[in-house]
């Protein structure tokens, strides 16, 4: 390992509460150097899981938050103009492939398809990355692994993963943790009492039942953690819930009212 990726090391053990056997399965996928896709709603623990696995496998982690303005060059690299001439700079994907990191492309459907195809050669058995502009065919470091995350909830014709991309990955399904585990996570992440965390989880359960009935996405574990953090700052439970769990997810007055009733019923 070169010193190059020291900044990308996960040096403190991230807290991750497993939902099922995903740790063992991911380890097997890593041992076989298979690319892995993590599927699930936003804020349910996918990124935390990758951080945990990078720590556990002792690999640096290079994370890229994908967006529609991202180009292939943003992933692969480009020549920079400098006073003395031009200098090649590896993009995050190249950096990870060259030095043996785990490269995590978060919310990969946000990127345009002409951007995501650049990762294809890294996912087949040759594990190469052509750097066309530079005239280099990079062979991935033996420890390199590609991981992508994907929220099937946003699926639409415009924003779906191409079959040719999808079929290159082994996949793990994620979802919000079961109630008891989710309450433990929220309590542990924020320091609020488990009973109160369980109440927040109950409100989230009510919101998640509204998915498809006016809500695109339920209240995520992440938002429950936000609510807990606000409560720890001294914000009242009701205000914290409104701020972290109601306003972010909907502008619809009726649904907001429904959720506020749920909060009063559960937590008042
Ligand atoms: N299984 C879990 N173990 C520990 N923390 C979790 C877990 N699931 C969710 N969280 C909490 O929820 C937050 C959001 O999770 P994150 O991994 O960022 O979601 P995603 O990447 O799926 O959008 C995390 O920062 C963490 O506080
Ligand atoms: Mg994430």
Image (cartoon, rainbow, N blue to C red):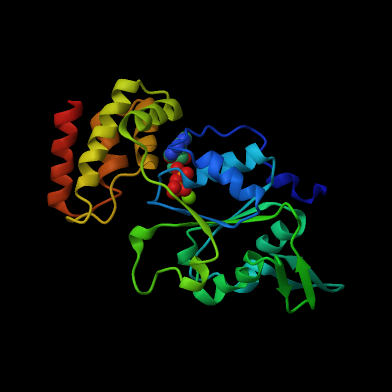
Q: Which residue is found at the position 47% from the left and 59% from the top?
A: 107
Q: Position of residue 63 (x, y in %)?
A: 59, 53
Q: Position of residue 132 (x, y in %)?
A: 73, 79
Q: Is residue 132 above or below residue 197?
A: below
> Can residue 233 be seen at all in this image of the molecule?
no
Q: Is residue 147 above or below residue 89?
A: above
Pick the residue in front: 98 or 260. Answer: 98
Q: Position of residue 57 (x, y in %)?
A: 66, 40
Q: Which residue is found at the position 26% from the left and 56% from the top?
A: 216
- Specify whether 44 is left or right of 136: left
Pick the residue in front: 192 or 42. Answer: 42
- Specify whether 100 is left or right of 65: right
- Specify whether 5 is left or right of 207: right
> Can residue 265 be seen at all in this image of the molecule?
yes
Quarter holding the C terminus is top left
Query: What residue occupies the far right of the structure in this picture?
Result: 84
- Specify whether 251 is left or right of 59: left
Q: Is residue 111 above or below residue 21?
A: below
Q: Which residue is found at the position 62% from the left and 72% from the top?
A: 118
Number of marks present in the image shown: 0
Q: Is residue 75 above or below residue 34?
A: below
Q: Position of residue 182 (x, y in %)?
A: 36, 33
The quarter holding residue 122 reads bottom right
Ligand 1: give its quadrant.
Answer: top left
The quarter holding residue 233 reads top left
């Amino acid at each position: 390992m070169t010193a190059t990726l020291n900044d990308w090391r996960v040096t403190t053990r991230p807290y991750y509460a497993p939902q099922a056997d995903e740790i063992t399965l991911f380890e097997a996928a890593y041992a076989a150097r298979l690319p892995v896709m993590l599927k699930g709603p936003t804020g349910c623990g996918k990124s935390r899981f990758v951080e945990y696995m990078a720590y556990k496998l002792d690999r640096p982690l290079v994370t890229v938050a994908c967006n529609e303005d991202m180009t292939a060059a943003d992933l692969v690299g480009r020549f920079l103009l400098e006073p003395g001439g031009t200098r090649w700079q590896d993009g995050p994907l190249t950096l990870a492939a060259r030095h043996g990191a785990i490269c995590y492309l978060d919310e990969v459907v946000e990127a345009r398809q002409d951007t995501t195809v650049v990762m294809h050669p890294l996912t087949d058995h040759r594990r190469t990355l052509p750097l066309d502009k530079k005239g280099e065919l990079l062979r991935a470091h033996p420890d390199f692994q590609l991981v992508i995350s994907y929220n099937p909830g946003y699926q639409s014709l415009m924003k779906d993963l191409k079959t040719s991309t999808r079929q290159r990955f082994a996949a793990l399904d994620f979802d919000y943790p079961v109630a008891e585990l989710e309450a433990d996570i929220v309590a542990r992440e924020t320091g609020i009492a488990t009973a109160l965390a369980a109440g927040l989880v109950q409100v989230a359960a009510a919101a998640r039942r509204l998915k498809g009935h006016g809500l695109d996405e339920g209240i995520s574990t992440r938002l429950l953690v936000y609510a807990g953090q606000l409560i720890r700052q001294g914000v009242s439970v009701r205000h914290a819930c409104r701020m972290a769990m109601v306003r972010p997810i909907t502008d619809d007055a009726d649904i907001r009212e429904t959720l506020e009733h749920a909060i009063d019923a559960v937590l008042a």
